[in-house]
C-alpha cells in the first residue's frame, strides 16, 4: 500500500513539474493561458512622425525603435548599470549618410507629462548625455518641417565643430 501511495505522489509531483516548466518556457499550456500576438512596429502617430522626418531630412538615415543598448555600452560598473537602460528604446535615431549617429529623437505624448514619465525621461536623457548622445524631444507629430530641418542643421554643426575642436 505504501509503495502505491508513493508512486501516485511521484506521478502528481512529476505532472506539476511538467506544467511548471511549460509555463516558464512560454509554451501554451493546455488551458491556453499563454499566446503570442503580432503587433505593429510603430503606432500611427510614430509612423506619421517618421514620414515627416524622412521628408524634412532626405539626406539623413533615420532608424526607429532602437534599443538604447544598441548605441550605449557600460565600462566598469556592474550588471545593474546596464540593466538601468538595456530595455529602453529611443523613438528615432538620426544618422549622417555615413552612418554616424548625430542625435536621437523622443516623440513625447501624454505619458511623459506625469511625475513617473518625467523620471523615466530624465533617466534616459541622463544616460544618453553621459554617453555623448544628444536627445531632442518633440511634443507633436505635426512639428513643422522647418523646425526639424533647423534642428538637424544645428546638430550637424555641433558634430562638425566637435570633430574639429
Image (tube, rainbow, N blue to C red):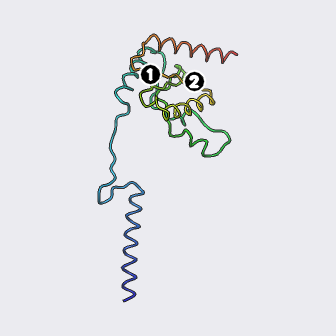
The part of the image, by quadrant, that contains residue 111 is: top left
* Category of crowding for the residue at label 2, using alpha-carbon neighbours closer than 10 angstroms: few (below 14), some (14–19), many (at least 20): some
Above or below, comparing residue 86 to residue 157 in the picture: below
Above or below, comparing residue 103 to residue 4 in the picture: above
Q: Say whether disc 2 or disc 1 marks the residue closer to the N-terminus.
A: 2
Residue, disc 1:
139
Question: The C terminus appears in which quarter of the rendering?
Answer: top right
**Where residue 14 sits: x, y (%)?**
40, 71
**Where residue 63 sits: x, y (%)?**
46, 27
- The dot on residue 96 is none
Residue reaching furthest to the right: 165
SS for dot 2:
loop
Residue at 39 percent of width and 88 percent of height: 2
Above or below, comparing residue 138 to residue 112 in the picture: above
Lateral position of residue 49 relative to residue 154, left or right: left
Above or below, comparing residue 60 to residue 63 in the picture: above
Residue at 52 percent of width and 25 percent of height: 104
**Where residue 128 sits: x, y (%)?**
58, 30
Q: Are marks 2 and 1 in contact (CB under 8 Å)?
A: no
Observer-nearest of 138 and 115 = 115
The part of the image, by quadrant, that contains residue 154 is: top right
Residue, disc 2:
134
Amino acid at each position: 500500500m505504501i509503495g502505491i501511495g508513493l508512486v501516485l505522489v511521484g506521478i502528481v509531483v512529476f505532472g506539476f513539474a511538467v506544467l511548471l516548466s511549460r509555463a516558464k518556457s512560454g509554451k501554451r499550456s493546455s488551458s491556453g493561458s499563454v499566446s503570442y500576438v503580432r503587433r505593429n512596429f510603430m503606432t500611427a502617430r510614430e509612423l506619421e512622425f517618421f514620414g515627416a522626418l524622412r521628408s524634412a531630412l532626405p539626406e539623413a538615415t533615420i532608424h526607429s525603435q532602437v534599443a538604447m543598448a544598441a548605441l550605449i555600452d557600460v565600462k566598469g560598473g556592474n550588471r545593474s548599470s546596464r540593466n538601468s537602460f538595456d530595455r529602453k528604446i529611443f523613438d528615432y535615431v538620426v544618422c549622417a549618410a555615413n552612418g554616424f549617429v548625430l542625435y536621437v529623437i523622443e516623440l513625447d505624448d501624454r505619458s511623459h507629462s506625469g511625475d513617473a514619465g518625467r523620471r523615466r525621461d530624465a533617466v534616459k536623457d541622463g544616460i544618453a548625455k553621459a554617453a555623448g548622445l544628444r536627445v531632442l524631444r518633440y511634443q507633436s507629430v505635426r512639428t513643422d518641417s522647418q523646425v526639424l530641418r533647423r534642428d538637424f542643421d544645428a546638430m550637424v554643426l555641433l558634430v562638425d565643430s566637435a570633430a574639429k575642436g
